[in-house]
Image: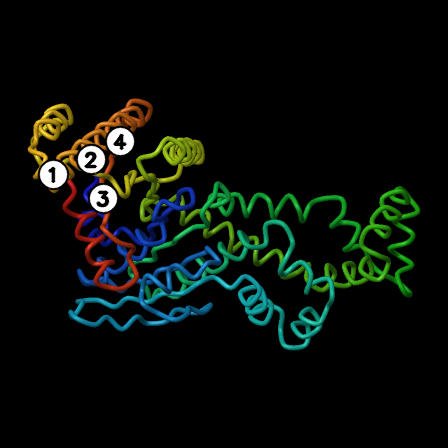
């Protein structure tokens, strides 16, 4: 069984990454882990890459920004501090440009139409910026523990590929073309194109327009020196994610689709040599009494007609037992496929979590699961 308190109390644990499919309570789990770590004395920040506002809602906040915000915990006095933030892809990109390009070049880059396009819609930008933000948080040294809540899909692990994908993109033919010296209104670019890429340039110009192609060339020439530094920082963050100070937790509900997704995450993390700590089986339905489903249904059938409440309770218990047995079979199947992965079961709450008290309850269940 996964010992959650041992994991979050370990001073060598510096990063916890929660991943899993959508609708399994991953964001709530990440927030509960961060809150419990702060309660037990660690300086903790929780970062969500998910653009939805579930993290802010779970913490009882109206909104979160692109920089850590301290969460004022009411009702008890944690030994540490809890901070929270939500990744703003565009602002992170802008901040990176301002920090590493210098004032004049930064303004030139930020005003470039091509930059304004790729900073919000270029494939992989969110993952690149997630790596950048995680690296920034780790580099400050301000946080003893960083909890990362990833997007609710298989793309949650795409940021693991960010350094490799970025390097491949920068070394690609299109980037080399766009970074070619642009002489006299683009003559150098046209010369390169005429040498072997006429068809390519014609296709690109048709798709994005000649002006945008010129904007792209100007952007890449100005941004070329920055990419090297970003690539190096992304490489360091990738090393951080593979270090023994990082713990990956896969979150899943005890349902066939969610557990299939969990198996995908486990296999992918194993293939990438990532430090997987365990599976959080969320919203389980443990049996509350030692009475089989068959016995409960038999008792319900024999109940007096004037005892409708007792009959309803017995039938509800029978349904609960059937659900628990089905969940146990599914989790047993997962364990047979992945015997090395410890599991912690978190019983379902009667209502959604939307405040700190609810998060504390989840944290207690994470730490005391049998």
Task: In the rendered structure, find residue 346 and report the number of the disc placed on it.
Answer: 3
Q: Earlier in the sequence, mark 3 or mark 2?
A: 2
- For residue 251, side relative to residue 216 (left or right): left
Q: Disc 4 to disc 1, how far (Cα)?
A: 15 Å
Q: Earlier in the sequence, mark 4 or mark 1?
A: 1
Q: Disc 2 to disc 4, how far (Cα)?
A: 11 Å
Q: Earlier in the sequence, mark 3 or mark 1?
A: 1
Depth check, mark 3 against mark 4: the one in front is 4
Q: Disc 3 to disc 4, how far (Cα)?
A: 12 Å
- For residue 283, side relative to residue 287 (left or right): right
Label 1 crowding class (10 Å Cα cut-off): few <14, some 14-19, many 20+? Answer: few
Label 3 crowding class (10 Å Cα cut-off): few <14, some 14-19, many 20+? Answer: many
Task: In the rendered structure, find residue 288 and report the number of the disc placed on it.
Answer: 1
- For residue 224, side relative to residue 146 (left or right): right
Q: Do the numbered discs 3 and 1 sit on residues whose CB atoms are within 8 Å? A: no
Q: Earlier in the sequence, mark 2 or mark 1?
A: 1
Q: Earlier in the sequence, mark 2 or mark 4?
A: 2
Q: Quadrant of the C terminus?
A: top left
Secondary structure at badge 4 equals: helix
Depth check, mark 3 against mark 2: the one in front is 2
Secondary structure at badge 1 equals: loop
Residue 68, x across and y down, in percent: 39, 69
Report the residue at 50% width, 47% height from top. Answer: 159
Task: In the rendered structure, find residue 320 and report the number of the disc placed on it.
Answer: 2
Q: Quadrant of residue 339?
A: top left
Report the residue at 64% width, 56% height from top. Answer: 121
Report the residue at 28% width, 27% height from top. Answer: 335
Q: Earlier in the sequence, mark 3 or mark 4?
A: 4
Secondary structure at badge 3 equals: strand
Label 4 crowding class (10 Å Cα cut-off): few <14, some 14-19, many 20+? Answer: many
Report the residue at 40% width, 42% height from top. Answer: 20
């Amino acid at each position: 069984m996964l010992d959650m308190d041992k994991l979050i109390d370990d001073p060598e644990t510096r990063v916890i990454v929660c991943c899993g499919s959508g609708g399994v309570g991953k964001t709530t789990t990440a927030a509960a882990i961060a809150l419990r770590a702060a309660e037990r004395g660690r300086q903790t920040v929780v970062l969500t890459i998910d653009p939805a506002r579930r993290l802010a809602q779970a913490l009882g906040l109206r909104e979160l920004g692109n920089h850590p915000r301290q969460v004022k915990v009411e009702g008890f006095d944690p030994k540490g501090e809890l901070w929270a933030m939500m990744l703003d892809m565009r602002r992170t990109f802008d901040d990176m440009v301002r920090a590493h390009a210098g004032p004049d070049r930064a303004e030139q880059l930020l005003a470039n139409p091509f930059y304004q396009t790729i900073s919000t819609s270029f494939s992989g930008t969110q993952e690149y910026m997630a790596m950048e933000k995680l690296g920034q948080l780790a580099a400050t040294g301000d946080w003893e523990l960083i909890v990362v809540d990833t997007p609710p899909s298989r793309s949650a692990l795409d940021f693991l590929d960010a350094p490799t994908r970025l390097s491949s993109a920068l070394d690609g033919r299109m980037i080399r073309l766009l970074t070619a010296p642009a002489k006299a209104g683009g003559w150098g670019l046209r010369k390169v194109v005429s040498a072997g890429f006429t068809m390519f340039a014609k296709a690109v110009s048709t798709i994005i327009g000649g002006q945008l192609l010129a904007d792209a060339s100007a952007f890449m020439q100005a941004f070329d020196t920055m990419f090297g530094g970003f690539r190096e920082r992304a490489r360091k963050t990738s090393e951080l994610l593979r270090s023994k100070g990082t713990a990956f937790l896969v979150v899943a509900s005890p349902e066939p689709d969610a557990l299939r997704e969990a198996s995908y995450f486990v296999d992918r993390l194993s293939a990438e040599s990532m430090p997987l700590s365990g599976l959080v089986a969320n919203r389980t339905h443990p049996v509350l009494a030692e009475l089989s489903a068959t016995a409960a249904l038999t008792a319900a059938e024999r109940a007096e007609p004037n005892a409708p409440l007792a009959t309803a309770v017995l039938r509800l218990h029978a349904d609960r037992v059937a659900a628990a047995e089905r969940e146990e079979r599914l989790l047993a199947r997962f364990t047979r496929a992945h015997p090395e992965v410890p599991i912690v079961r978190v019983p379902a709450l009667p209502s959604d979590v939307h405040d700190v008290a609810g998060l504390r309850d989840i944290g207690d269940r994470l730490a005391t699961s049998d």
